[in-house]
Image (cartoon, rainbow, N blue to C red):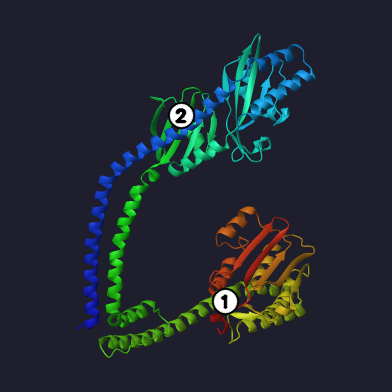
Amino acid sequence: MQHPPSLLRSKIAARISRKLAFIYTAIYLLLLLSLLAVLTPILYRDAVKRETQLHSIFTEEYAALQTQLSESMNSLSNDFFLLLDTYVKLPDDASRALIVQALSSYAASYHNYAAVGVSLPSGEYISSFYYTNIQQRELLDGNVHYQNLLSTHSNSYYSPIYTSRIYTEKTTYMDANYDDLIYFSKNYSYGVNTYTLTVFYKISETLQKNNTLNASSFNSYLILDKYDDVIYTTDTALSEPLRNYLLEDSFKFSSSVGSFRFQKGLCFYKSIPATGWRVFSYVSFTRMLQDLLLILGLVTALYLISPILYNIFLVSVTKKQLAPLKNLADTMAAFHAGEDIRSEINTRDEIEDLSNVFNKMVVEINAQVKDIGLKEHENSVVNYKLLATQIDPHFIYNTMNIINIMARQGNTSAIVEINTALVRILRERLNSKLSIHDTVKNEYDTMIQYEVIMNYRYQHQVEIHYDIDDALMDMEIPKNILQPLVENAFYHGFGDMDIVLHGHIDIMIYAIEENLIIEVSDDGKGISPERLSQVMEQDYSIYKDKKPHIGVNNIRQRLNYIYQGNYQMEIHSTEGLGTTVIITIPKQMPAEFTSA
């Protein structure tokens, strides 16, 4: 068979393109691996050196802050402590006012001091003007280490950094312009008394500077004090696992400065000897090697540009020759049996001949599909009608039993009435124009005849009530759907009861949005939970006993034929109270069955 020249050219071009793509990809991978092998250790070493230097820079910021606070506290004169001793010996408002004035002057002499306070041996706390005593005492009293400082007379203590971003409950104690505070407390012995002086320091400038430095190089950082409490962290999700890792017995610091691997990155640390603080900075390997990623990205971009340019020029050259062939291929790929699709190609060559062959094939396939579809539809309707007729022997059998009972009683008028009702029902069933669907009104009329028969069987002790929306009378529903449900209610809801007094069967048909609801309820003996579970999970009959019965499986199969699973059949029952069967179907019958 001769292939169209254009088709041959496209296959050759495709093979060449695949080989070029393979070689080009191999070169790219080789170059990529070479860059990784050479650049990774170099860039990693440089990154570690750079991060270590940056970590030392902002560690020194905190060390300088501590030094500043400690030195400023040492600048207090003996006159101040003499004022304190005088007040302790003889407390009065005048002495207290002098202490407040001295504290306020001391706080005002330093730029970032928010407030200064002093705790006396008696437990009284006096502060500068900036904050109230109550606000400061709440902060101090809530810190166990500060309380320990008061009782043990140890040297000094630095508090955690209180920020609105982390400790939101502390925001009421912070200045409107400075949302971050740290306080430094130190014990002073003067004579026989020990005084605890506390400086509240606005640390926002230091935090902003260090956080900016951290953001440029690290993912986050953490500060722990000598008690292993968190002084400050930029990432609460990282601080807890890192702190737990540091507290493990297996972890030991080999020196006051260094680094260790943590999670998917490195953690740099450095200690501040004066206070025992340890500052930790975490950086992920991805961030450390971001220069390598940038280089690899540029190499990849160069790799992609060449084939893109190649494809642009190739498409522009071959578009005219290969476009008809591609259109034909797309048309063939989009074709599904039964669709009326055509390929319109006028190239006056082998591609046009192939297009005409395809169009002829579409016509022949669609004709066969239509014939098969008609046969399958006919078979589906026949199967449905066979399922429907399975109900008739049970119904006729039960009706003949009633006629036999009436005959033994000599009730000829009842026999005539029952037989007339039976004939009317069977005439409707055996109508030569029997279809899958029927109107709600015809189903209702059939039920009226069936009720005549069952009234003789149950001596009018079971009443049937109808609640059917008049607007639905002309709507189509599956044929012979009501009578089997009502027959189950009669024979299995009331059949085994010795005495039936005022039994009821309610038939309701109503619409909710686009669905039609059919409910058949009885107040008979009901179903046990075990049997109901079997009915819902398997295709058992609603009532399983030795009597002839009509199973719900027949109804389910017929509904499934019509609606292909787009329906619901629910069964609710309580022993001694009755059973309700609810069928939900679409208002509109499927199109393939409306003309069955």
- Residue 487 lies in what quarter of the image? bottom right
Look at the image and tell me in which quarter the N terminus lies.
Answer: bottom left
Q: Which residue is mark 1?
A: 389
- Residue 563 lies in what quarter of the image? bottom right
Pick the front one: 296 or 532: 296
Q: How many marks?
A: 2
Pick the front one: 145 or 512: 145
Pick the front one: 294 or 408: 294
On the question of residue 237 being in view, the answer is: no
Left or right, 232 with reference to 17: right
Residue 326: x and y in percent read: 32, 79
What kind of residue is marked 2?
A: Leu
Q: In what element is the residue under mark 1?
A: helix
On the question of residue 515 being in view, the answer is: yes
* Distance between the alpha carbons at the discs numbered 2 and 1: 81 Å
Query: 531 above or below 282?
Result: below
Residue 259: x and y in percent read: 39, 32
- Furthest-left residue in this view: 2
Q: In what element is the residue under mark 2?
A: helix
| Other residues around mark 1 within 10 Å, as few (<14) / some (14–19) / many (≥20) | some
Left or right, 522 with reference to 57: right
- Report the residue at 42% width, 32% height from top: 56
Q: Which residue is mark 2?
A: 246
Residue 596: x and y in percent read: 55, 83
Front of the two marks 2 and 1: 2
- Report the residue at 49% width, 28% height from top: 63
- Report the residue at 70% width, 72% height from top: 509
Pick the front one: 200 or 536: 200
What kind of residue is marked 1?
A: Thr
| Other residues around mark 2 within 10 Å, as few (<14) / some (14–19) / many (≥20) | some
